[in-house]
Image (cartoon, rainbow, N blue to C red):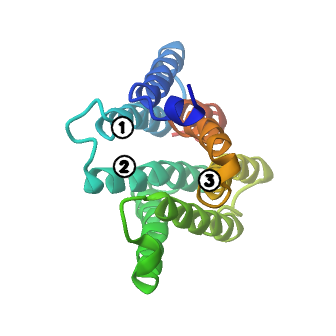
């Protein structure tokens, strides 16, 4: 069996997300009645939405081929990072303000990606979405770099360090996806290796980020 076949298994991403949901639930149960209400809600909400993402966009679901569904969950997946990073950077600030700022940053990458697609339609034509993925990944890396430089420098060194780790996690994830998709697109001899490499950021995105976010933010957000 090729690595490409492994990565295309319809049960794979739901399995990663289910494991994340179980671990997230165990963390919340262990610390029930303590810690930040915001972080606890963030964990519960995004453990659930990540699991929904993995299932509803897979071939296990009748909605698995929906482009609108996929776009919605991509934006939501980025929103969960920006929301937590905003709250870590400004833990005493209003949660609604954090959500508004996070939503703004979550839409930057898809809007710019659509702009590139409009300017270079020949690269986005056809059924292979790999170039679309690669474009999104590269733009998101730039967005994360700008965000890290401008939006998470407030607060003491400990809060800044947590923000940097959250953003660094997502940056590594998107960099690995970009490298993998570049191999798949432009290096036929390494195509299968590219699919295998995608397993790492897939695990990070679906299986690890929510528990990682909890571990990083819970000690730094008090309400």
Q: Quadrant of residue 75?
A: bottom left
Q: Position of residue 47 (x, y in %)?
A: 43, 32
State the residue in front, 78 or 214: 78
**Residue in view at x 62 percent, y 41 percent:** 192
Q: What residue is shown at x 51% (from left), y 57% (from top)?
A: 93
- Would you call the spot at circle 3 few (<14 residues within 10 Å), some (14-19), or many (20 or more)? many
Q: CA distance from mark 2 to mark 1?
A: 8 Å
Mark 3 and mark 1: Cα distance apart in space: 19 Å
* Residue drawn where x is 54% and y is 37% of the image: 4
Does 19 sit above or below residue 210?
A: above
Of labels 3 and 1, earlier in sequence is: 1
- Residue pushed farthest front? 189
| Sequence order check, earlier mark of 3 and 2 | 2
Q: Which residue is mark 2?
A: 73
Q: Position of residue 151 (x, y in %)?
A: 63, 66
Local SS, label 1: helix
Q: Is residue 19 left or right of residue 50?
A: right
Examine the rendered structure and indicate whether residue 209 appears above or below residue 67: above
Task: Determine which residue is flagged by label 3.
Answer: 174
Callouts 2 and 1 close, C-beta under 8 Å:
yes
Q: Is residue 182 left or right of residue 7?
A: right
- Describe residue 160's horizontal placement relative to residue 91 as left or right: right
Of the image marks 2 and 1, the number of the one nearer the N terminus: 1
Dots 3, 1 in contact, CB < 8 A: no
Q: Find disc 1 in the rendering and name its residue.
A: 49
Seen from the viewer's position, the closer of residues 132 and 174 is 132
């Amino acid at each position: 069996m090729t690595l490409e076949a492994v990565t295309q298994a319809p049960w794979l991403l739901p399995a990663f997300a289910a494991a994340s949901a179980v671990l997230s639930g165990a963390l919340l149960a262990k610390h029930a009645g303590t810690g930040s209400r915001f972080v606890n809600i963030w964990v519960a909400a995004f453990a659930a939405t990540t699991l929904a993402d993995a299932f509803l966009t897979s071939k296990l679901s009748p909605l698995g081929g929906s482009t609108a569904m996929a776009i919605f969950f991509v934006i939501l997946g980025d929103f969960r990072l920006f929301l937590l990073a905003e709250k870590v950077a400004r833990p005493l600030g209003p949660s609604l303000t954090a959500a508004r700022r996070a939503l703004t940053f979550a839409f930057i990458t898809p809007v710019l990606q659509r702009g590139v697609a409009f300017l270079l339609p020949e690269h986005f034509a056809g059924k292979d979405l790999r170039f679309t993925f690669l474009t999104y990944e590269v733009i998101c890396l730039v967005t994360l770099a700008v965000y890290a430089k401008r939006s998470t420098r407030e607060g003491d060194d400990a809060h800044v360090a947590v923000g940097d780790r959250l953003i660094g996690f997502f940056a590594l994830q998107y960099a690995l996806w970009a490298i993998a998709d570049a191999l798949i697109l432009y290096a036929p001899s390494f195509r299968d290796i590219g699919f295998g490499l995608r397993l790492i950021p897939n695990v990070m995105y679906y299986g690890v980020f929510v528990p990682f976010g909890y571990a990083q933010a819970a000690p730094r957000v008090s309400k």
